Amino acid sequence: MSVKVNKDFSYVGKSLDRNDSFLKTTGRAQYTADLKFPNMLYGKLIRSTVAHARIINIDTSEAEKLPGVKAIITAKDVPSMKWGLSPARFDENIFAIDKVLYVGDKIGAVCAVDEETVYKALKLIKVEYEELPAVLTWQEAAKEGAPQIFEEYPGNVNTEIHHKFGDPDAALKEAYYVRTDRLQGQRTYHAFIENHCSIGMWDGDKATLYSSCQSVHYLQYHLARVLGMKMGDLRVLKTHVGAGFGGKLDPTGLDFSALILSKMLGQPVKMFYDHEETFLNGHGRHAITMELTTGVDKNGKVLAHKFKAILDGGAYTGLGIASTYYAGSLLGVLYPIENYQFDAYRYVTNLPPCGAQRGHGQPQPRYAFEHHLDLIGEAIGVDPIDMRLVNARKNNTVTTAGYEVKSYHLGKANEMARDASGWKEKRGKLGLGRGIGVGNGGFVTGAGFCQYRTDLPHSVGMIKIYDDGTRAFVYSQAVDIGQGSDTVLLQMAAEAMGYPYEKCQMYAGDTDLTTLDFGAYASRQTLMAGWAVKRAGEDVKQKILEQAVEMFRESGRIKEGWAYIGNRELRPDDLDCKEGIVFVKQEPSLTLTFEEVARRYFVTKGVLIGRGWYHPGKLGGNHKGAAVGTSPAYSSATQIAEVKVDLETGQIECVDTWDVHDSGTIINPKLFHGQVHGAFSMGIGETIWEEVKFDDKGKLLNGNFSEYRLPTALDMPPVLSLTVEDSWEPNGPYGLKEVGEGATTPTMGCVANAIYDAIGVSMTELPITYEKVWRALKEKREKEQK
């Protein structure tokens, strides 16, 4: 593993242990479902059993008679205001009012004294439906005369995008070689271990909600808006969160129900999902049909590209508009394509809604283009890595869409991956059944715009130093969902203050007690919350240095006019502070401790507090939808996979992998490499096994971890994780960029290309299951025998 460490840093660039590692490894970490409060009640959602129907009647009378049942609520008992994560498409209600739109849609909620009673009550509730024709694929939704799911989406088209830069048609006519391919990506699920859970309670007019979520701020905003509350009257906080991958960003029926039921009953209410319900809640990766047409010159340089994407969005919008834009907006960051056309359609269907999943809209289009690029290279006789090198974006450039890219080392990443993997010795030389493939990817380091219209900063940080200087408390609404954001934020805060990391303590994810941050999505927190806490740390340090000047003067240890400070008075910029020691730069033996300086500050000036904030400023182009894809910084990565395919059974084994990331400065190498390993696991799983399946009535078939096939430790290959060492991002604190989501984007492409190298058959539909490979090999043999 290769990570450049700046020796001038005390904590940045160091593989420090996670700040929550002791709690988690000893089982002391509490998740929302672990919390218990006096007189707490329990609740579950009432869900639709049909895919598309009018609600005629909901009979709760028998359930209400059951001893222990406290309340049953439906749409008539709650606000009817629509909500969603895309302001242009607020289309979801707390509970279905007139129609249910998929099997599992929210109809109401039951609350009782214990879980057993809740489950008994659910069985006693009778819902009468007038069933309507259901559309279960985008192809059905797009047919003329298809049933309309929403009146506001004619033809069931929820989102439509048409972007055109340059003149693709003219460039295609001039191209040396033109190729069109059609590929298919499947619907997948986040597969986090911790299910959603929410606990609501009230104290007078003040409400508190504990929720397993990715953004306490967005959740607070949406709940307050729909429930008619002031945001200050609603406290939202999280405990430990057992992963999210995008699936805990949307508000859920649990959040609304817990607050509404708690207010009705005057007791805390815990609402929770089981595994199947998390599948039904959805918001995972869209199924997507893709058509790509590309023209290149004889060296493989892309002259023009047309990309058409059709997404199956499920029943509601959520983050689906952004998913649709992301499918096409970032290709031009990877490769500088001057003539580019992107056309996309997102259809609503009668299935659980789709939304953001790690890499948000990117992994499947990256698979499609990376495989498409290999097929083009093969046709014109150019090596796959050479194809990528001739097209890779360089530093300090602007994309066709107007996105400014500062640091970018994709070409270097390709070269390093090529050399580390032994590509030249292996490609096309491993024999039938063995192959090696490459894929490129990358992602935004934070979205350039908030999810709703506002002039708020994107992140605010605050640091409070304890009265005697013996501890630093760092405050932020950033949400650690398992990626280690609390740890890296503490590292950056400690570095900025010059204060010992082990004496820093994080307070995060609480809208009452911590400072604004938009949360964990779009790989934003390390950069955006990082800037906020770094600036807060620098504010603390400046105050410490100013106080130390006074103390040095009072002590008589420094005489004005000494040579090392010049013929003048001592100033704060003559001093520095590292690891808790304040010293004179030109005479490091003259020191004070941070603690004694901080105590004097408290005595003479009050609480020592540092403040910082971050806003990315104006970013991106001027075309419609330009906001999606804007970012202060962009990562890039090259991954290579080597696979072995059993020619008799189609079984695929991923035997070795390599990842080279351009992520700028690595704040914590151990956590960085953990992100890469986890991304490979998710990417390999989605390439070979994972797919959410439904029957012909829209009923979920594999909503559990037995039948939704996930890779295990036995399926994981060795991963060599490397970084581009000379990468420095000027728009990131300490020169950093993201790794969390970008690491998932090359994997499908590199594994699919390795399979192609192994069997000589282009696999154009995900997942590339053993059965599909077996059938492809069978068809290949039959053709060869004719």
Image (tube, rainbow, N blue to C red):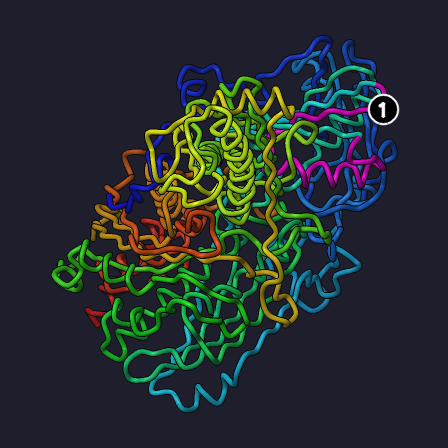
Q: Is residue 210 magenta?
A: yes
Residue at x 59% of width, y 70% of height: 621
Q: Is residue 337 above or below residue 475?
A: below
- Residue 412, percent from left and from top: 28, 62
Residue 120 in sight in this render: yes
Residue at x 20% of width, y 69% of height: 784
Residue 520 in sight in this render: no
The region drawn magenta spans 204-232
Q: Is residue 118 above or below residue 673?
A: above
| Image quadrant occupied by the C terminus | bottom left
Quadrant of res 749: bottom left
Q: Is residue 396 magenta?
A: no
Q: Is residue 732 left or right of residue 372?
A: right
> How busy is the neighbourhood of tag 1: few (under 14 within 10 Å), some, or many (20 plus)?
few
Mark 1, residue position: 205
Q: Is residue 713 left or right of residue 89?
A: left
Q: Is residue 343 above or below residue 462?
A: below
Which is more toward the observer, 464 or 416?
A: 464
Secondary structure type for disc 1: loop
- Amino acid type shown at disc 1: Asp
- Residue 489, percent from left and from top: 48, 36
| Image quadrant occupied by the N terminus | top left
- Residue 369, percent from left and from top: 40, 66
Residue at x 54% of width, y 53% of height: 286
